[in-house]
Image (cartoon, grey):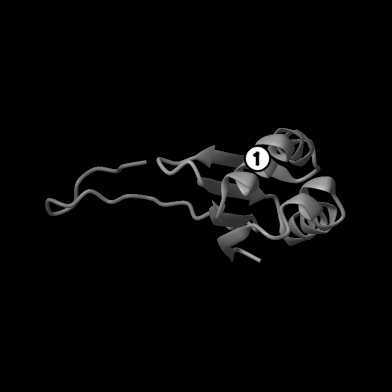
Amino acid sequence: MCHRPYFGVALVRVRIIVVNNVFLTGLLICQSDGETAIVAEFLPRHLELTRAEPGCISFEVSPTGDPLVWDVAECFQNADSFELHQARVRASEWGRARAGIKRRYSVWGQ
């Protein structure tokens, strides 16, 4: 909300909202056509299950210009929902199938 200019400067009221969201971004990097086939087979179900998890705000795994690399972007409501997601993935078919595929991720907001 802007207010009347004061000495040529508009005063602006800013509201800061603190959130506890956890974000993960990065790359899923296959080294072979075999690993790409694993992603193609198991990723659709992984996307479906993750997006249905409590606390999942967004979850995207998108192809890049390189057919062996996917861009990953996740947002979870809080650290608890993110940790529950991580535990589910470790115990899932997706988690076992993609265990050897290189991942380069950054996580923040925990």
Q: Secondary structure at mark 1?
A: helix
Question: Quarter of the image holding residue 37?
Answer: top right
Considering depth in this image, is 95 or 48 the residue closer to the camera?
95
The front one of 25 and 103 is: 103
Q: Furthest-right residue in view?
A: 91
Q: What x and y, as percent, mark residue 32? A: 57, 50
Name which residue lies at 71% across and 56% down: 78
Q: Position of residue 72 (x, y in %)?
A: 56, 48
**Front-most of 103 and 35?**
35
- Where 29 sits versus 54, above or below? below
Percent x, y of residue 91: 87, 55
Quarter of the C terminus within the rendering: bottom right
Residue 104 picture quarter? bottom right
In the depicted structure, whether residue 51 falls above or below residue 17:
above
Residue drawn at the location 80% of the way across and 54% of the way down: 96
Residue at the spot 47% in from the left edge and 51% down from the top edge: 15
Determine if residue 57 is in view: no
Nearest the eye: 51 or 14: 51
Instruction: Please give the residue where the numbered disc 1 appears in the rendered image.
Output: 37
Local packing at callout 1 (Cα closer than 10 Å; few below 14, some 14-19, many 20+) is: few
Please provide percent x and percent y for residue 62: 53, 38
Q: Is residue 1 visible?
A: yes
Q: Tell me how many marks there are.
A: 1
Side of 78 where 36 appears, left or right: left
Horizontal side of residue 87 vs 63, given as left or right? right
Horizontal side of 23 relative to 56 (left or right) equals left
Name the residue rendered at 64%, 55% in the picture: 21
Say what amino acid the circle numbered 1 marks: Ala
Quarter of the image for the N terminus: give it. Answer: top left
